[in-house]
Image (cartoon, rainbow, N blue to C red):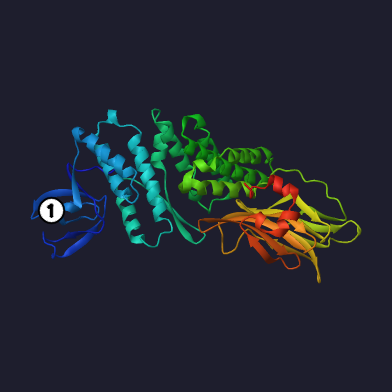
């Protein structure tokens, strides 16, 4: 934390003009922002004569743009009261962190608990969220980030799907966890802050990413569900579901058993009570649903394939799996059609459609992303079409086979996707011949063919009907 001087004022307004003289028409030297710390060196005509060490510049500031701060033990209680107010005030994060730094300087070490560290970490996390992808007030947020940096609050940033993501580095969350007297709610907030999936570097190697996910799972195990309120409990279950889904995918990628991790992910998801999350936290549940939905077939054993047509998996180039369509009526001929992938092939998902004829297969090329491969016969022979969860660079999602209507030759699918921070769920009827969209709805009850021809196994196991 910045070593605060004895005679201080904290700027409480954004765009506060620092002028060369104590007049409104004097030359403007620079702009100051809420949370900026000033050394007060005098007062004249309603202006404070100040020096800002961050900008290494002195000048005059209107008196109502800043508040004097006393750094004494007797003033600590008042500073803490202001901190508690600002902690719950969106848009005042830089100001709140500045008051927190003043409180830590004023309060005796014996009186300092986990509360100010918890408050700073919460406000830093909220400020990072506001700065992520913002265009309307980008300059304001950038200035607020510079203000909090002087107090040792560090941010990490990286590009994700064409958008800039800013994340708090979590130093004070770690400190809260190290304090034995920290309240369970504070510890839970710290763990949730340290395990956010959107704050994982997207450029990590698979080995490094698996290590991060393992660390996240261990952090989440530190919190007992009985010690926190209902909302926090559901948030923890949703976060654990996403983490265990990531671990299940990592196990599959390495050829290790993934059943236990996949089952744990589903169990944690089912333990979430979405109504307890409220509107602000509902997206955390939707995120967990997409991650668990993407690994729904992880670790499942393939069922025997009946009928003349079957899909066979074989190793391809290093790291690849090749899927071939074979016709049992022609045992000595080469595969009818073949396609290779670096993704995880879910052989347990194979579903044959004898009436078409066609077969469908789930393939997971990325963590949190599952596609549907459709093997079907057209006028030019057999072909393989890939149905992704979404287009235009969505962040994560899954698409799954939901049934087949033989009379209209329509493939029934369900898909969920997160695109630019928004979650969408749809149920669709596709023309099998060219996979063109025929009908789409937000609920299967609104589609005629879904009512009659949806697959019973899909209806039993899918997360799309939650």
Q: From the top left corner, tell me how far across and down residue 63 is, in percent.
A: 15, 52
Q: From the viewer's perspective, tell me whether residue 250 is left or right of residue 141.
A: right
Q: From the viewer's perspective, tell me whether residue 292 is left or right of residue 305.
A: left
The residue at the point 17 percent across, 52 percent down is: 64
Circle 1 Cα neighbour tier, 10 Å, few/some/many (<14 / 14–19 / ≥20): many
The residue at the point 45 percent across, 48 percent down is: 280
In the image, farthest residue toward the left: 45
The residue at the point 47 percent across, 45 percent down is: 278
The residue at the point 56 percent across, 59 percent down is: 394
Front residue (pair 34, 258): 34
Q: From the top left corner, tell me how far across and down residue 321 is, in percent.
A: 73, 54
Q: From the top left corner, tell me how far across and down residue 98 is, in percent.
A: 27, 45
Q: From the viewer's perspective, tell me whether residue 402 is left or right of residue 417.
A: right
Q: From the viewer's perspective, tell me whether residue 366 is left or right of residue 375.
A: left
> In the figure, residue 33 lies in which quadrant?
bottom left
Q: How many marks?
A: 1
Residue 4 seen from this side: yes
The residue that label 1 is drawn on is: 49
Q: From the top left corner, tell me how far across and down residue 322 is, in percent.
A: 75, 56
| Element marked by disc 1 | strand
Residue 341 seen from this side: no
Please state, as top left, top right, bottom left or bottom right, where the N terminus lies in the image: top left
| Residue 49 drawn above or below residue 106 | below
Front residue (pair 379, 53): 379
């Amino acid at each position: 934390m910045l070593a605060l001087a004895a005679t201080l004022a904290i700027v409480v307004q954004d765009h506060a003009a620092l002028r060369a003289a104590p007049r409104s028409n004097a030359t403007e030297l620079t702009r100051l922002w809420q949370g900026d710390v000033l050394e007060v060196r005098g007062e004249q005509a309603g202006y404070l004569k100040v020096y800002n060490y961050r900008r290494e510049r002195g000048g005059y500031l209107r008196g109502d743009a800043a508040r004097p701060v006393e750094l004494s033990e007797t003033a600590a209680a008042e500073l803490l009261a202001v901190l508690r107010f600002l902690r719950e005030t969106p848009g005042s994060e830089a100001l709140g962190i500045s008051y927190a730094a003043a409180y830590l300087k004023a309060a005796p070490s014996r009186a300092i608990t986990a509360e100010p560290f918890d408050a700073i970490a919460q406000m830093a996390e909220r400020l990072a969220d506001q700065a992520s992808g913002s265009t309307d007030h980008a300059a304001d947020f950038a200035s607020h980030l510079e203000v909090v940096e002087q107090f040792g609050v560090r941010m990490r940033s990286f590009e994700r799907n064409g958008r800039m993501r800013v994340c708090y580095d979590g130093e004070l969350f770690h400190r809260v966890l190290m304090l034995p007297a920290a309240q369970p709610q504070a510890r839970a907030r710290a763990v949730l802050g340290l395990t956010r999936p959107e704050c994982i570097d997207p450029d990590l190697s698979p080995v490094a990413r698996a290590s991060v996910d393992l660390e996240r799972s261990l952090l989440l195990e530190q919190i007992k569900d009985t010690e926190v309120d209902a909302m926090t409990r559901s948030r923890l279950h949703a976060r654990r579901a996403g983490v265990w889904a990531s671990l299940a995918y990592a196990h599959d990628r390495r050829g290790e058993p993934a059943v236990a991790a996949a089952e744990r992910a589903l169990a944690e998801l089912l333990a979430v009570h979405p109504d307890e999350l409220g509107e602000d936290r509902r997206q955390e549940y939707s995120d967990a649903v997409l991650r668990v939905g993407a690994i729904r077939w992880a670790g499942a054993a393939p069922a025997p394939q009946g009928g003349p047509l079957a899909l066979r998996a074989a190793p391809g180039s290093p790291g690849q799996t090749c899927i071939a369509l074979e016709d049992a009526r022609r045992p000595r001929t080469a595969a009818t059609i073949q396609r290779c992938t670096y993704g995880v092939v879910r052989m347990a998902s194979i579903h044959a459609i004898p009436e078409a004829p066609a077969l469908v297969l789930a393939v997971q090329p990325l963590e949190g992303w599952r596609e549907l491969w459709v093997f079907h016969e057209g006028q030019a022979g057999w072909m393989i079409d890939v149905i992704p969860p979404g287009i235009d660079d969505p962040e994560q999602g899954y698409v799954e086979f939901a049934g087949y209507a033989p009379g209209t030759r329509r493939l029934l699918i369900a898909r969920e996707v997160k695109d630019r921070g928004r979650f969408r769920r749809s149920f669709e009827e596709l023309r099998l011949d060219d996979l063109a969209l025929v009908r789409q709805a937000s609920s299967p009850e609104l589609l005629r063919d879904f009512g009659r021809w949806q697959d019973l196994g899909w209806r039993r196991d899918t997360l799309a009907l939650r």
